[in-house]
């Protein structure tokens, strides 16, 4: 059983342990926007990650690729959000037309 206890109740149960809650909380500053170097590093990191994923998918056999519904020609597109969205829409439409799923 889980019981929720407020800060005030906890302070009454454990006197002296919650005194830091009585102090004014510091003002939180807005996080600085990333600079040009940080943006460049994020872009390079994203590219490396994407490249690694493409290499991993490329190492799959043709049967494994068929299991996940792609062919070798589509491997460079595995990280393309627009491609994935269109692919999923096409699959749902094909399943509806084939009567495998009921239309709503």
Image (spheres, grey):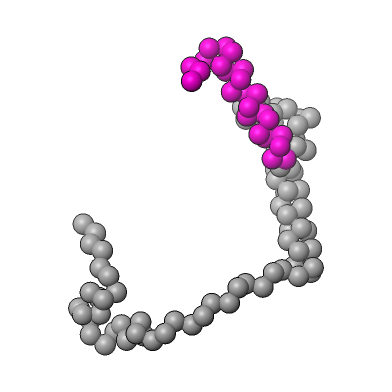
Image quarter (top left, top right, bottom left or bottom right) of the N terminus: bottom left
Locate residue 75: give its quadrant.
top right
Locate residue 13: give its quadrant.
bottom left
Q: Is residue 49 above or below residue 39?
A: above
**Coordinates of residue 44 in the picture (x, y in percent):** 78, 58
Q: Is residue 88 magenta?
A: yes
Please tell me which residue is depicted at 72% across the width and 40% down the height of the picture: 80
Image side of residue 45 versus residue 97, left or right: right
Q: Please, which residue is most extreme toward the top here?
A: 98
User: Is residue 23 visible in the rendered structure shown here?
Assistant: yes
Per the picture, the main secondary structure of the magenta-coloured stretch is helix
Residue nearer the viewer, 9 or 58:
9
User: Is residue 78 visible in the rendered structure shown here?
Assistant: no
**Coordinates of residue 103 in the picture (x, y in percent):** 51, 18
**Coordinates of residue 23 in the picture (x, y in percent):** 38, 86
Residue nearer the viewer, 92 or 6:
6
Image side of residue 101 versus residue 48, left or right: left
Q: Is residue 59 above or below residue 71?
A: below
Image side of residue 56 versus residue 24, left or right: right
Which region shows up in magenta? 80-104
Residue nearer the viewer, 40 or 103:
103
Q: Is residue 71 above or below residue 43?
A: above
**Coordinates of residue 93 in the picture (x, y in percent):** 61, 20
Q: How many marks?
A: 0
Please tell me which residue is depicted at 26% across the width and 63% down the height of the picture: 4
Please tell me which residue is depicted at 76% across the width and 64% down the height of the picture: 39
Q: Is residue 44 magenta?
A: no
Please tell me which residue is depicted at 29% across the width and 74% down the height of the picture: 7
């Amino acid at each position: 059983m889980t019981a929720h206890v407020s800060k005030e109740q906890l302070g009454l149960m454990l006197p002296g342990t919650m005194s830091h809650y009585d102090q004014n909380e510091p003002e939180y500053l807005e996080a600085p926007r990333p600079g040009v170097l940080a943006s460049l590093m994020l872009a390079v990191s994203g590219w490396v990650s994407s490249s690694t994923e493409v290499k991993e998918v490329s190492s799959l056999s043709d049967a494994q690729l068929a299991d996940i519904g792609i062919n070798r020609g589509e491997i460079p597109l595995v990280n393309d959000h627009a491609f994935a969205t269109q692919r999923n829409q096409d699959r749902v439409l094909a399943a509806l037309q084939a009567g495998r799923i009921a239309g709503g």
